[in-house]
Amino acid sequence: MSVATADRPGFALLGGVQATLIFTIMILSVPLPLVAREFGLGPSGVLLLSAAYGLSFSALLLLGGRLTDRHGGRRLLRVGLALLGAASIACALAPGYPVLLASRFAQGVGAALAAPAAVAVVRVLRPEPADYRRAMAAWGGLSVLGATAGNLLSGAVAAWVSWRWLFAVPVLVALVGLARSGSLPPADPAGR
């Protein structure tokens, strides 16, 4: 059995996490007017809410990579997924704008920890340069898939039920990722 075949479940798990991290950026893009109406938001509140996840995700991504280097990919993946899942539950249950806004920022922090950790584990799963290049090409496609799904699903869910149900996706992926992360190889020799 080749390395690429043996690591398919691990890569599928990590790819699902990556797609979900990008999906979560787009999660409020379509139902944002509904959220604004529910919480009585003006233009500045809407703008900040739409940018909160992306701001914290992008601002802390390098820190997430540094922490991954220091503490290990598997460990940081678990921390990032736990934070993403908890913040997603808080978003779904948010009684008002301040809680929703803070929770969106927290989701971005969780994503900034999980994303570089997932890539570090992929590097262990696909150590050969050619295999790693193919994996990273697929990784980019998963990001596009996540963004597209976020836009499409957010519109459908907001039309049929409540926008709050959109946060079930990152919660479920975080739970599955946490449950299955023990089967992933450590991203460094120390077993982290």
Image (cartoon, rainbow, N blue to C red):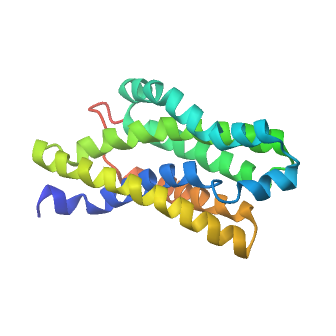
Q: Residue 69, how many percent across, how many down?
A: 36, 26
Q: Residue 175, how many percent across, how many down?
A: 56, 57
Q: Residue at x 58, y 67 (%)?
A: 153
Residue at the far bottom in the pictured view:
160
Residue 169 lies, with reference to residue 84, above or below; the image says below
Q: Residue at x 82, y 43 (%)?
A: 97
On the rendered structure, is 163 left or right of 5?
right
Residue 186 appears in the rendering: no
Q: Residue at x 54, y 59 (%)?
A: 150
- When asked about the image quadrant of residue 165, the answer is bottom right
Residue 162 appears in the rendering: yes
Q: Residue 39, how many percent across, how many down?
A: 86, 49
Quadrant that contains the C terminus: top left
Q: Residue at x 34, y 60 (%)?
A: 12
Q: Residue 67, how many percent across, how many down?
A: 44, 26
**Looking at the image, which is closer to me, 89 or 148?**
148
